[in-house]
Image (tube, rainbow, N blue to C red):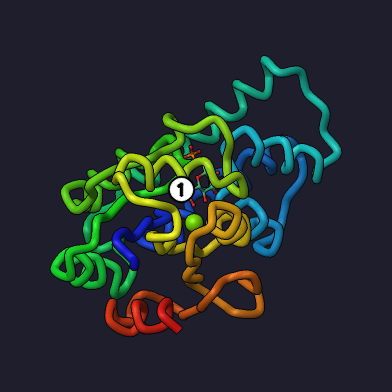
Amino acid sequence: MIKAFLFDLDGVLVDTAVFHYQAWRRMANSLGFDFTHEFNETLKGVSRMDSLDRILALGGVALPDERKLELAAQKNDWYLELVNQMTPDDILPGAEAFVEQAKRAGMKIALGSVSKNAPLILARVGLTHVFDAIIDGSKITHSKPDPEVFLNGAAELNVQPAECVVFEDAVAGIEAAKRGNMFALGIGSPDVLTEADLVVPSLEHITVAELLAAVDK
Ligand code: B16
Ligand code: MG
């Protein structure tokens, strides 16, 4: 029986992926190269330092660790300039209504994000209070596709992994959910999220009752 919903943040509740893309591009441009929206897709759910390594590898740039830490800090400053302009209007369509529906249905709710900025983002959009547990980048050692973030969420909610549904927009996040033995609801395209148990375009397109019926099938 499903007892808990574990929500990814970026791409499920808010669209911070566009801000990550702008800030990482600004950094790549400062080093003399660029990258595409398609490449940005592969960074979703990937931690800050792992994202930096992937971008530098794409640009063929090798740097000492000290310089990499400086670049990551610079990117984060640029990213935060954008995050600090967020308001409750930046919650993705259907997300808040769905979470409220879930709470009324008695579900426990956790956040499972590898972002170290997750608490700030939740505060900006006014969603902090809906969560029974918040697992963010400061509480994990492995980014998605490792299941750690979701397993920690289940443990903090005191439920078994098989009693959880994970809501994810990233390929790495779906893999993390499946490796954690959880039902994976993909938010996006079935052509991209091929390993998800079910895919919907957004949380506007499914109700809690429809989701629980699909899990039971
Ligand atoms: P930060 P999620 C992830 O958030 C993003 O998808 C990914 O692009 C980002 O690099 C990562 O957080 C780390 O974010 O730099 O803020 O610590 O999808 O797990 O909510
Ligand atoms: Mg995401």
Q: Position of residue 20 (x, y in %)?
A: 52, 48
Residue under the point 25% across and 71% down: 98
Q: Is residue 198 above or below residue 25?
A: below
Nearer-the-camera pick, 216 or 128: 216
Q: Which residue is mark 1?
A: 150
Label 1 amino acid?
Phe
Q: In the rendered view, does 72 fall on the left or right side of 16? A: right
Q: Based on the displayed image, in which of its 4 quarters is residue 68 positioned?
A: top right
Label 1 lies in ligand 1 vicinity (Cβ under 8 Å): no
Q: In the rendered view, does 73 fall on the left or right side of 83? A: right
Q: In the rendered view, does 105 fall on the left or right side of 172? A: left
Quadrant placement of the C terminus: bottom left
Name of the residue lying farthest toward the top: 66
Residue under the point 31% across and 39% down: 119
For label 1, the SS is: helix
Q: Position of residue 134 (x, y in %)?
A: 31, 42
